[in-house]
Amino acid sequence: MTTTTLNHDEAHHHDMPTGWRRWLFSTNHKDIGTLYLLFALTMLFLGGASAMLIRLELFQPGIQLLDPDLYNNLVTNHALIMIFGAVMPAAAGLANWMIPMMIGAPDMALPRMNNLSFWILPAAATMLILSFIVPFFPGGGTQINTGWTLYPPLSVQVGMSMDFLIFAIHLLGISSVLASINIIVTLLNMRAPGMTLMTMPMFCWTWLVTAFLLILVVPVLAGGVTMLLFDRHFGTSFFDAAGGGDPVLFQHLFWFFGHPEVYILLLPSIGVLSHVIPAFSRKPLFGYKSMVGAMLTVATIGMVVWAHHQYTIGMSLGAVTYFMIGTILISIPVGLMIFNFIATMWRGAMTFETPMLFAVAIVLMFTFGGLSGVMLAVVPADMQYHDSMFVVAHFHYVLMPGAVFGLFAGVFYWLPKWTGHMYDETLGKIFFWTNVIGFNITFFPQHFLGLAGMPRRIVDYNMMFTEFNVISSIGAIIFGLSHLLLLYIVIKTIRGGKKAESRAWEGAKGLEWELDSPPAFHTWTVAPQIK
Amino acid sequence: MNNARSGENKNRRTTLLLSGLVVGMFGFGFALVPLYDLFCEVTGTQSLSQRKINPADLQVVKQVESDRWVTVKFDATVNPNLPWEFQATTRSMRVHPGKTYEVNFVARNRSGDAATGQAIPSVAPWQATPYFSKLECFCFNKQTLAGNQQTDMPLRFMVSPDLPADIQSLTLSYSFMRLKASKNKTDLSELLPQIAKQSATESTLPNR
Ligand code: HEM
Ligand SMILES: [Cu+2]
């Protein structure tokens, strides 16, 4: 075979643009990847700030800092910023940087659309932040006190900040749908000759499934919030009982999106682990095919178990039983993925650099979160745990390790490739330990709080919950501040450090490690041949 | 292998297919509105309280259980779209299953304009719903109040002796909703009276 000329247009691209044009008009996957990652880092600090305020308020019983509406506004804002502003864009940033380099493509398939899907994000974030601050201006209406789930009737009654939020969700949805289309087209059509679907790197597989999930569920959320908008302003009654509507319908639409969304957050990080663990165990990934199979199973069953978030709405016994069994079934393929990671480490020549430390922590702590998930999946048990701090503990144990730590692992793993410099390993390890210890001090006590009956999303609590809340808040301070170290490490690595080799990690495998560190502005303009 | 042209065509085709999927799923979201109704109607999954209990069984006069006490609490709310005040004159009472009781609710129109509303009942815990029979209720009919009018609204009810023994207390809650020509496809003014009647033996909320 000959070389492909897919990149014909790219090849005589004008020289690398400079200044702000380089970023605003960028169609280069590496630059756009960088933009995504920087955006996500910014949002991580914004969302983190709101979390710190929440934990400060909960440090003591009673109402100290925040009035109840502001508290709930912060809870809403924290979740939305973290999910849509931090985790999803960071995962998209990794995808942009790595997918073309991993599959030997010169760029993403639709570079201009790539530019659009990123640049919608700052606009969306502005709307999201406005939805938080508008109520503080005269005539700004009431605050969004619904939580990120936006259940009516409350969400119909909130002031105009809800309209900003609905618009923000539309923009965020458009951005991630465009990014997903781009990723699928790239993965299906742009792989180097000789690379089949079943031999492409696992990170690509996880993103292929994630992108399909996004395309299937984000439009349904968009539809749901559109109906909310109509109920608010155009006299329809999709959700308003007084007009013959049903508020529970919104819950179904929301969780039809919401449950697959948790896999959207999880899977890219599973993809990162599938590279980090083999690299630092110096063994190939155990059970590639079963990994793909497990992922497809999770995605498929994951689409039809959403109502485990709604056990308490009064569904029939048959319905809750179905949702319970479906939910518990999912833990089998999820467990299989974890098993594959452990089997990859088994008798490997392991070393524990920062990405690997995060990987091992994920395997341990994510499994723990999965266990509390199975507890929540059991209907009679969930009748008690629902809307308690136990649920908060559950989803932070799956989301922090399952999504955020996976992204950290990916950042540390590929930072040498992106910047051409090795990060400071000692600082990396200090970051890891403060971060993971802080995380556990923050969220472990919340299991006990929930089991003892402390409800979530309430500004005040009974005296008897004080001790665990104090511990949790102290943990949150350690956890929150540790991210300043992350910021420092990233900046330090960008500005200099030990020169990274092409293959920055001895055990790293894959096409991306055959490129220079940092890679040239245009890479794989001639597609590599895979044997 | 590929040349630029066919590569681009391929990309365009995949993009179009995926965009179609996106539009389709957006439509599916809206299609879920009627589908959800339909699904609940066919399978009856909407409510745990919609057990198949023969209403005739409950109407049969049964022995009054004079050694058993059940506490019934009354709760009254008004949907913000109706400018009324609505209260239970009795907050709570102790009753014998099988015996008929009467209580009064009071409604007052705070505005100067006449308005028509309908009260929607619901029972908590939901397991008790089928065992709470309303023999006579203002909620069976639309209620019209002239401007500033105040009126008593009587309710005659009985708790069935079949009420499971572990339920010692239940709450009957009413929300008054305004009846108006609905802009939505479901015409509430037809729906509500029917719901209210059904609710003597069935779920208290319509399927949507
Ligand atoms: C073994 C796998 C899992 C099971 C059986 C499971 C089960 C559940 C159940 C039953 C609930 C509802 C609890 C309630 O509200 O009463 C829940 C909530 C939640 N789960 Fe999981 N889960 C699992 C894994 C995950 C994963 C992998 C993620 C994300 C990466 C996740 C994220 C969440 C979130 C965010 C919520 C709370 C949503 C909210 O109410 O705001 N779960 N889980
Ligand atoms: Cu779920």
Image (cartoon, coloured by chain):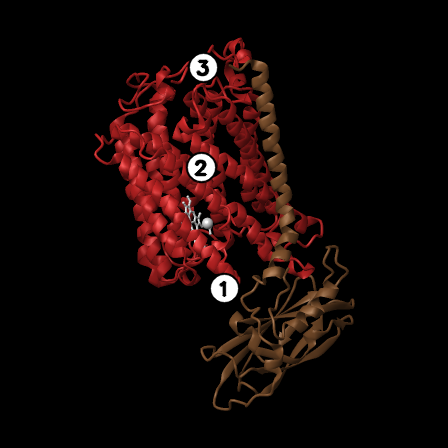
Residue topped by disc 3:
A527
Inter-mark Cα distance, 2 to 1: 36 Å
Tell me where residue A228 appears, x and y as whole percent: 63, 49
Query: Mark 1 vs mark 3: same chain?
Result: yes
Closer to the chain start, of discs 1 and 3, is 1
Closer to the chain start, of discs 2 and 1, is 2
Chain label for disc 1: A
Crowdedness of circle 3 by 10 Å Cα count: few (<14), some, many (20+)?
many
Asked where in the image residue A99 lies, by quadrant, the reply is top left
Inter-mark Cα distance, 2 to 3: 31 Å
Asked where in the image residue A365 lies, by quadrant, the reply is top left
Chain the render paints red:
A
Q: What residue lies at 52% left-to-right and 72% top-to-bottom?
A: B127
Chain label for disc 2: A
Residue topped by disc 1:
A317
Q: A169 or B157: which is nearer to us?
A: B157
Drawing shade for chain B: brown
Residue topped by disc 2:
A87
Q: B135 or A169: which is nearer to us?
A: B135
Mark 2 or mark 3, whichever is nearer to me: 3
Disc 3 marks a residue whose amino acid type is Ala
